[in-house]
Amino acid sequence: MISKDYIILDPHGMHARPATALIKLARQYKSSFSLKKEEKLIQMRSMLNILSIAAKYGDTISVIIEGEDESKAVAAFDYFFNEEMKKF
């Protein structure tokens, strides 16, 4: 299991477009994915789940990855949160 913290860099926070892109990214891997903000933990299976954590600009969220390809997945999530989140 890998758990990594990320800061939301999009001025609009985690909205529909990045949430959809995040789901598409997660579906490329066999591992299971969860997001955690403060005490709320959700499975990264639907856009509504992701939007329910109400992550705003500057918030810190944790991505929890567990599975056989978690090492590959964490690199892709690093890129997503550090580069792609700036473009939405």
Image (spheres, helix red, strand yellow):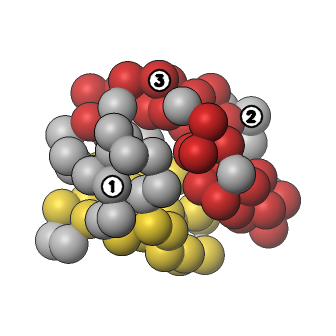
Residue kind at label 2, given as amino acid type: Gln
Looking at the image, is 76 positioned above or below residue 50? below
Q: For mark 2, does the 10 Å Cα neighbourhood hold few (<14), some (14 to 19), or many (20 or more) residues? A: few
Circle nearer the viewer, 2 or 3: 3
Residue 72 vs residue 56, the one in the foreground: 56
Q: Secondary structure at mark 2?
A: loop
In the rendered structure, are the residues bearing label 2 and label 3 in contact, judged by CB atoms less than 8 Å apart? no
| Distance between the alpha carbons at the discs numbered 3 and 1 | 15 Å
Coordinates of residue 41 in the picture (x, y in percent)? 26, 60
In the rendered structure, are the residues bearing label 2 and label 1 in contact, judged by CB atoms less than 8 Å apart? no
Of the image marks 2 and 3, the number of the one nearer the N terminus: 3
**Which quadrant, please, contains the C terminus?**
top right
Looking at the image, is 87 positioned above or below residue 1? above
Coordinates of residue 80 in the picture (x, y in percent)? 67, 49
> In the image, which disc is placed on residue 31?
none
Location of residue 61 by image quarter: bottom left
Name the side, left or right, on which 21 lies relative to 77.
Answer: left
Residue 32 visible here: no
Coordinates of residue 60 in the picture (x, y in percent)? 36, 70
Circle nearer the viewer, 2 or 1: 1
| Distance between the alpha carbons at the discs numbered 2 and 3 | 17 Å
Q: Secondary structure at mark 3?
A: helix
> In the image, which disc is placed on residue 17?
3
Of the image marks 2 and 1, the number of the one nearer the N terminus: 2
| Distance between the alpha carbons at the discs numbered 2 and 1 | 26 Å
Residue kind at label 1, given as amino acid type: Tyr
**Circle 1 sits on which residue?**
57
- Residue at position x 31%, y 65% in the image: 59
**Circle 2 sits on which residue?**
28
Circle nearer the viewer, 3 or 1: 1
